[in-house]
Structure formats: C-alpha cells, structure tokens
Image (cartoon, rainbow, N blue to C red):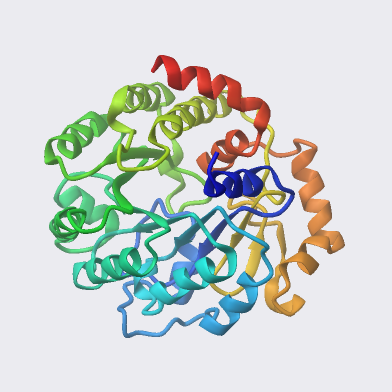
Amino acid sequence: MSVKHLDNMQKILGNDIAYLIFHTTGRCNAFCNHCFVWENVEAAGKFSAPDKPSLRDELSLDEINKISQGFPYLLLVNLAGGEPFLRKDIVEIAKIFYKNNKVNFITIPTNGFLPEVIVPQVEKLCQELPDVFFRLSISIDDIGIEHNKIRSFKDGYETLLKTARDLQFLKEKCNNFDLRAVSVFTQKNQDHFEELLDELENLEIFDAITVMLIRGNPKDPELKKIDIQKFTKIQKRLNNGLARSWRHPGSKILSQILAKTSEGVIDSFLNPGVRKFKCYQGQKSLVLNDIGNVFACEILEDKPLGNIRDFNYKIQDLLKHQKSQEIINFIKAKKCACTWECAINTSQIFNASAWPALGMRSLVN
C-alpha cells in the first residue's frame, strides 16, 4: 500500500473532520425556486456579478486560512455557493486547503453561467494543484428554455453547454478533474426527466450524471411533492452506468457508493422519521457557510453549532463547546432523519463495517 493510500486511510478512519462543505459565497448570478439556500442568496445578492461585492460579511481569505489551520487534515472539500466562481479568489481558497490540510479531492458545483471565468480558473486549479483531483459539477435541471426558466437566467442552457464543451477540451491537458452534470429532481421536472437524461447522454460531454432529490426548505415548497417511483426509475438508469466517471481514481468503488446512496435516499423518503444509517455529520463532516456559521448538517439549518468568528477561528474549540456537543449527540442518537445524499454517502465512506459489502458490489458490477 502506497504512502498516499495510508494517508487517505488515516483521514477516513481517524477521529478528526475529514470532509468540509464550505459555502464560499451566498452570491449567485441566478435564482432558483428549488434552492435550499435561497434566503442566503437573497441576502448576499441574487443576480450578482464577479465584480459585485457580497451584501453579507463574507469570510476573507485571511479568515479562511485561519479556519483551515484548525483542521489537522481534510480528505474532501466541497467549495460550494451561491455560485463559487463569483469569488475571484477561488483558486487561492483551494490552495489554502491543500497547503494546510493536504486535501485530496475538491468538488466545485457551478451553474456554468460564467465560461470566461470558470474555464481559466479550472485550468489554473488543475495545473497549480496537480496532486488534487477536482470534480466540476454543472447544474442542469431541464432542457433549453425550461432550464433557463428554472434558473431565472436568459440563455443559461446555451451558456452552460459552452462552459462544458470548453472544459471537455481542457481534459486533453489536465487529467486531474472530471466533469459531471448534476440535476435536482423536483415536482416540476419529474414527468420528463427521462428526456433530460437522454439529452445529457447524447451530448457526450459529461463523465457522469448525478441526480439529487430536492431537499431543505425551497422557496417553492410545492416542488418537494415528487413521485418517488419516478425518482427510483431514474436512479436505476443512472446506476446502470451513467453515474460512473472513469476519470475518477476511485471510480469503481465510488459508483457502488453512489448506488448504495441512492438506495438510502429512497428508503429514507419511504420511511420518514426513521434513520437506518449511522450518520457522521458533526463527527467526520461539517458545513461552513459564507459568513462563518458552522453546521453539523445542511438539513439541520435551525441548529447551528456556532459562528467560527466567535471562537477565534478555532474549529476544535467550537466543536468542544456544549451547544455543539448537544447537537452532535442529537445526531448520534438518531433523533433526526433525512434524504440528504452527502450524509448517506459519508455514512459508507467513514464506516469501515460497510466496506466489505461495497467491495463485493464492486466485484459483481
């Protein structure tokens, strides 16, 4: 086993946080009714532009560096938003987490509406951080004008396809990233979702396709009234190959984790209030937002652990605080249940007892 693999195992099996979801900004150049952080977007500035500052007190690069220094290591960092590429310092943020935490994987979800910004930034990320594998996830929730309506962005579909095609060409000189299409399954698009998958597959641009169930408290609650049978049908199709990215270094086992995750999402939806998986939120994974609020979980937005600024940017002090411990124990005691893919996903990655079954699945699939 290589030193790198041993390092990864330490991050997975150790007692420290290994997965950080960091909402780098609340700003967005679009506005979606299914967005679970829409209130933050409204407060920070919807329909924003790269040269427009946030209306919220966004964490500075210096503050991010101080926060990063509090984590002994990190396996995975998700640099989310808002629209993360509205931050001009997105490359510097990624470099901080590599320098301080030797992060292995960085995911960046984007709406793809800034090709002139996204493509050169991704190239810079890949070239300056060759030891990091990047996952670029472009949001696509419908085809053509219907997608534009969802995102409240004129010519959005055409723009994101330009971004995707330009990133596809970039793969010829950068082998440390993959490109995914990520769709949110809602009441609005569920009746023609098969057509969307056909479109994405026929484009032959994306390395993989991911479909996530709408979650949280969207601006339009009606969008959560989905038909779980239709969602199940879509997930079965994805698990037959569309969800696997061969560019990812752990593609075979990762595809089985994703398949198991989709099964967990469906089971949780059908059994509301019942959690069958061991959740590691608050123990191995945390959420940090643009103004320094720390959460154990995106779903428990009404239960913040605290604001990192109040703890002099020391994450360990925040986690040891009584309020944080009460919320983490609340999760451990299974007093919450959800369909959040990230929580279900990490319940397999950080749970060694789940590995044999995943290994067997990867051998037969």
Q: Is residue 25 visible?
A: no
Q: Residue at 54% of width from left, 62% of height from top?
A: 102
Is residue 349 shown left or right of residue 130?
right
Which residue shows up at 72% across the image and 67% down it? 315
Q: Quadrant of the N terminus?
A: top right
Residue 91 visible? The answer is yes
Q: Nearer the viewer, residue 272 or 348?
A: 348
- For this view, does 59 lie left or right of residue 332? left
User: What percent of the width, then of the height, locates residue 146?
Assistant: 19, 48
In the displayed structure, would residue 160 be above or below residue 333?
A: below
Residue at 67% from the left image edge and 26% from the top image edge: 353
Q: Residue 116 at what x, y percent from top left?
A: 19, 72
Q: Position of residue 90 (x, y in %)?
A: 40, 73
Q: Is residue 149 left or right of residue 265?
A: left
Task: State the residue at coordinates (33%, 26%).
Answer: 234
Towards the viewer: 90 or 102: 102
Which quarter of the picture shows residue 286?
A: bottom right
